[in-house]
Amino acid sequence: MHELAFVIAGFVVGAIVGFTGVGGGSLMTPILIFLFGVKPYLAVGTDLLFAAFTKLGGTIKLARAKVIDWPIVLNLSAGSIPASLITLYVLHSADAASQPVQKFMTTALGLALLLTAAATLYKVLHGKVTPTSIAQGQEQLAARPRHWSLPLLFGAVIGTLVTLTSVGAGAIGVTVLMILYPMLPLPRIVAADIAYAVPLTLVAGFGHATLGGVDWAMLACLLAGSLPGIWVGSHLLTKTPERLVRSLLSVLLAYAGTKLLAL
């Protein structure tokens, strides 16, 4: 019975990701904890690989369309991957399944959800500030950050946050990219965000797997639902009031974050 429920949850989250772009981690991890009673460390680890495999397909599609700015992906990864490995080492040393670490992860997840809610609302209010196209000859200028060190710094912060909570590579990542690369067109911002999340979530997810923090059977069920869900959601994209959906999601994420902090 649980298997079918996991498939349905994967489908619902996949559909929402497909027509809003809001990261699956910010939705799936609270669902696993609140609806299914999954331990936080298992929910985070399983969701990291769930995110990696679902975003891998999107990255391949975007790479074929040649809309990914790989230097941006590499700069962010140079900060996020080492930070993820350091965080995994700390979790291994502290015993990820212990009660104090579980409490810390739950608190961090609550804060991450509140940040994601704020980032989602920011995109609702200011999403059109970022250009959707760019003048010919301005590509290299648009792909330059405000300062060379900022992608490394923000990448490290997001890498730590994602490894601890599985949340941060979606709405927060897009918001960070909008700030760091204000001239970069929105489609290329989204493409870069999806692409750099794949190696980060793979490293963090398999790292959690070595700590016993991945439920492989649950992961298979979630993926079985999410892949068709994303296909359905992407086809609903032009028929959905995106601002309304994002606004409702920001409220839902804020509620889940507050509830986690109260645990």
Image (spheres, rainbow, N blue to C red):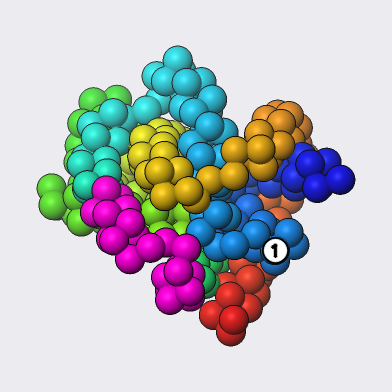
- Quadrant of the rendering where the C terminus is positioned: bottom right
Quarter assignment of residue 262 = bottom right
Rendered view: 155 above or below 140: below
Give the class, few, some or many, for how many residues have Cα within 10 Å of label 1's Cα (few <14, many ≥20): few
Question: What x and y, as percent, mark residue 163?
Answer: 39, 54
Q: Residue at x 13, y 48 (%)?
A: 148
63 sits left or right of 256 in the view:
left
As shown in the figure, which amino acid type bears the numbered disc 1?
Answer: Gly
- Quadrant of the rendering where the N terminus is positioned: top right
- Tell me which secondary structure the magenta stretch mostly adopts: helix
Rendered view: 226 above or below 34: above
Towards the viewer: 4 or 249? 4
Q: Residue at x 20, y 42 (%)?
A: 78
Rendered view: 105 above or below 236: below
Q: Could one spot residue 215 in this view of the protein?
A: yes
Question: Furthest residue to the top?
Answer: 64
Quarter assignment of residue 75 = top left
Question: What x and y, as percent, mark residue 104?
Answer: 43, 73
The residue that disc 1 covers is 37
Question: What x and y, as percent, mark residue 240?
Answer: 75, 45
What stretch of residues is rendered in magenta?
83-105
Towards the viewer: 189 or 134? 189
